[in-house]
Amino acid sequence: MLTFRNYNIADWFSFYRIAAAPFLLLLIWLDARVLFSWFLLVSYSTDAIDGFLARKLKITSPRGSQLDSFGDQFTLIVGIVGLYYFETEFIKSYLAVIGIAFVPYLIQMFIAYFKYGKATAFHTYLAKGSAVVQSVFILHALFFAPNTNLFYFMIALGILETIEEIILIFMYDYWVSDVKGIYMALSDKRATRPHKFKKFEGKKKNEDIE
């Protein structure tokens, strides 16, 4: 049975992003744009902090990767909701473009849950770059005004990242974390020899459960 002692400092930063989501939604409901923008900036900052700590302290784990992904998804959803509320006209003007990027993302999520039973946590370099651009665009739009060029760059990068995620899902028969990109997957034994990885996965699950 897992206890609070099983979680490390990087995990707690991920928990913060998840716990902050309802509070951020409350700020939207209260029409507190400035406060919402600053607290959203804090949430985005914790994403960079927990990743740095996990690598620096060498405390990365599949569980931590999944928590990080949940925190990212919660923060992204809240950020989009806030952007829609505070910049409604801009979102409505580019709804078709947003749909072009969002549909592949939904397809990727469906494939992941159908194959693995949960969301991916590959954490590729392309995904990290896409997340940074998304956060910069959303924060810039909230603090100042939407930047059209940055918006199109965010959409293009998001589509490329989603395509890479879909390809990686088909390359891995079993759920894995921290795959830096397709180039890494091509030489990853977990992708090329799934029968051996199955044994490894079983051992890992036993280690994670106390």
Image (spheres, rainbow, N blue to C red):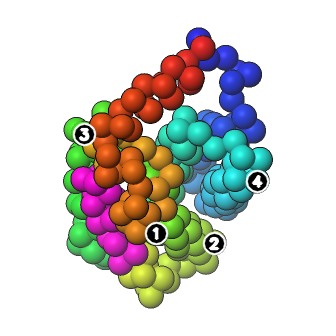
Residue 107 visible within the image:
yes
Question: Residue type at mark 4?
Answer: Lys
Label 3: state its secondary structure: helix
Tag nearer the camera, 4 or 2 = 4
Label 3 to label 1: alpha-carbon separation: 22 Å
Circle nearer the N terminus (4, 2): 4
In this rendering, would 25 be left or right of 175? right
Residue drawn at x 48%, y 82% is 150
- Name the residue type under label 1: Leu
Q: In this picture, which residue range is highlighted in magenta? A: 156-171
Q: Earlier in the sequence, mark 4 or mark 1?
A: 4
Residue tagged 3: 115
In percent of width and height, residue 169 lies at: 29, 52
Where does label 4 land, which residue? 56
Question: Is residue 166 shown in magenta?
Answer: yes
For marks 2 and 3 on the same chain, the one whose residue lies earlier in the sequence: 3
| Disc 3 crowd, CA 10 A, few/some/many (<14, 14-19, 20+) | some
Residue carrying label 2: 143
Residue hosting label 1: 126
Say whether disc 3 or disc 1 marks the residue closer to the N-terminus.
3
SS category of the residue bearing label 2: helix
